[in-house]
Image: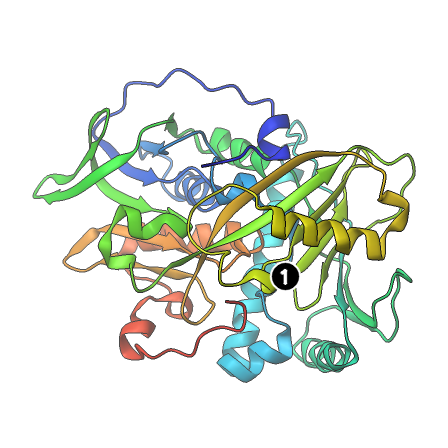
Amino acid sequence: MTSTSFWQATAGCPSAPAPRVNDVDCLIVGGGIAGASAAYALAQAKPDWKLAVVDRRRIAGGATGRNAGFLLAGTADHYAVAVARYGRETARAVFATTVASHHHIRTFLAHRPDVECDYIPCGSLTLAGTQEEAEVLAHSAELLREDGFDVDFVPHDPLRRGFCAAIRNRHDAGVHPVKLVHALLAASGAAIVENWPVATLESTPAGVVVQGERGQLRARRVLLTPNGEAANLHAYFADKVFPKRGQIFVTAPYPSRLLSEVVYANDGYEYFRQLPDGRFLFGGGRRAFAATETGTDETPTADVQNFLERFRDRHFPELIDLPITHRWAGTMGFTPDGLPLLGTLPGQPEIAFSIACHGHGMGFSLEVGRLAAELVITGKPPALFDVARLERNPASRPAAHV
């Protein structure tokens, strides 16, 4: 089953009639932020290429249209945890990737003042729910500053709502994710075909034959960006991408402004923000129900939604009587080591993929899209996110956020 998110309900982007598409230079399978970012990057790098994007449902119908609209630097883990897991050099490079992505988004929007995607450069707060986590945040902030990243550690709760400490990043932002995706795709000039599920991918001397349930397309190159549902598209991803469910609700507008920043709390397992019109968004709750919050079912559950309501009541008691207008769930793509996967299918170098940002696809988006475009053009994956690392170390340590 599925559900409709606030973003999908308010994007105001009607479905366009499917254009005639065939014999394209690159076909992108997946119309979320990963596919849209790659399409935009390919259009910049290869303006003479004919591009198309297909999706099995509406554009941004999957994880992109079902997230919280956070543009956060870094991975799902606190920086000190990332340094311990990946080493200092890799952790720094991964964080820098997300910083670069934020820069690309700001540049994209600065050059297109007519784009309306509710981009708000509000900054973020990462809140510690315990003193132990506060110590991790203090260490993370120290490491980040040493590595040249502009963050501040706050040794108390800046919101005065029951937390212990915080990291403030003034460069993070909030956005309407569905509107951003449509803006990127419009700028790319790619043909868009919605409600077109892919069944098979066959490599031939002339390129790739993409067989769908509603016809056939041909492309010289293909880029797969299916995220958490990757294994449904190709068996190669079965042991590399694991679907996890995230849940969110949004309230009616509150008459006054209580929050400025987007907020990531309790090791990132809960998160919240106040939208431009005063609504509140609360998401997370998965840690308490890890055994059931897996798979691709996009139906919100009573257990998690009730957990989120109790979280809201505890930290924002003035919102208790505020009606909830939207509830939804979405599927995130997780990897064994918590980092995105880029590469090509075995024996099919003309079929590339860029998938699974471990729940932080918005933060990685435009820079990973640029890297995916380079992969399509050159056939060489970026060393930082090369899927070959899993082949070299099949027992990769699981990431903390599972």
Question: Within the image, what quadrant is residue 53 found in?
Answer: top left
For the question of whether residue 253 can be seen, the reply is yes
Seen from the viewer's position, the closer of residues 284 and 138 is: 284
Seen from the viewer's position, the closer of residues 34 and 146 is: 34
Work out whether 319 lies above or below 292: above
**Residue 21, image x and y in percent?**
27, 24
The structure residue drawn at horizontal position 88% and vertical position 60%, both measured from the top left corner, is 159
51 with respect to 122 (left or right): left
Work out whether 158 lies above or below 6: below
Q: What element carries label 1?
A: loop
Number of marks present in the image shown = 1
- Crowdedness of circle 1 by 10 Å Cα count: few (<14), some, many (20+)? many
**Residue 230, image x and y in percent?**
34, 51
The structure residue drawn at horizontal position 59% and vertical position 64%, both measured from the top left corner, is 287
12 with respect to 257 (left or right): left
The structure residue drawn at horizontal position 18% and vertical position 40%, both measured from the top left corner, is 200
Seen from the viewer's position, the closer of residues 110 and 238 is: 238
The structure residue drawn at horizontal position 55% and vertical position 44%, both measured from the top left corner, is 329
7 with respect to 61 (left or right): right
From the image, tell me which residue sits under label 1: 73
**Residue 223, image x and y in percent?**
31, 46
